[in-house]
Image (spheres, rainbow, N blue to C red):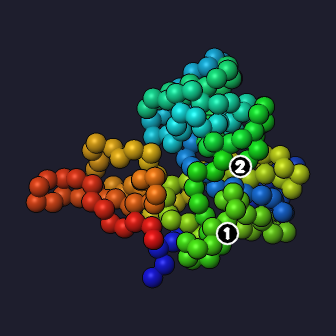
Amino acid sequence: MSQLVRRNSSVLLNSSGSLAPGASYTITAYEVGGVASANSSGGTISVYAGHGIAALDRIMVGTTASTFRSVSSVTATTVVVGSAVSVTAGDYIVNLGPDTGSSTPNWDGSGVTVYSTPTTATAVTQSRVTADSNGNYGYWWRGEQLWELARTAAGAAARVITDITGVGVTRVTAIPATGTLGQSIVYYNGSVDIYYVWMTGTAGDDWTEVMRAP
């Protein structure tokens, strides 16, 4: 049985009050970003706990490419960037990963991997796919939580998509000290992805390795 999850969706945009398909839009899968919890205009962005941003990532506020910034450090509820940026509570802070852009994104830093077939031998370059003339697109992925960024055929960021559900797995950069019963995580150990579940065993609760990538 496949270890991957299928993602089929479509990108729709508001056009003069009507929904129009994002024909030939580019959709890139990214690690989970963050949601601003307060207005700010300096170098520290307050975010709700549970964000997926790490130091050295690059971020963008919503779809505004001019807000492209480098991340200096993070805490559970803050993201510190290299230069001031205006943020409104509720804004999406898009996690562009180690994007190589200078003043604007190159859209090449996705930290997740998606696939064109239900095997891990067919990774999609830059984790980006192109929608058809009706805005439909799809790919296979491991089921961890992720976001998507849709860009027009001309390359402009147009929509942040956050309502993506897989199998309830969160990708982490370090294994947490504790978890909740049944919680699932994916951790990259420098060589392969490892899938853990927090379970109760004879020695007490702990992370149990369920599967690792071949």
Amino acid beneath label 2: Asp
Question: Which residue, as the protein is rendered here, is positioned at the far front?
Answer: 191
Tell me which numbered mark, 2 or 1, is placed earlier along the sequence: 2
Corner quadrant of residue 100: top right
The residue at 78%/47% (across/down) is: 158
Report helix, strand or loop for mark 1. Answer: strand
The residue at 56%/66% (across/down) is: 141
Q: Circle 2: is it few (<14), some (14-19), or many (20+) Cα within 10 Å? A: some
Residue 150: numbered disc: none
Residue 108: numbered disc: 2
Left or right placement of residue 175 versus residue 98 in this view: left
Amino acid beneath label 1: Gly
Q: Nearer the viewer, residue 163 or 29?
A: 29
* 2 or 1: mark nearer the eye: 2
Corner quadrant of residue 67: top right
Left or right placement of residue 116 versus residue 146 in this view: right
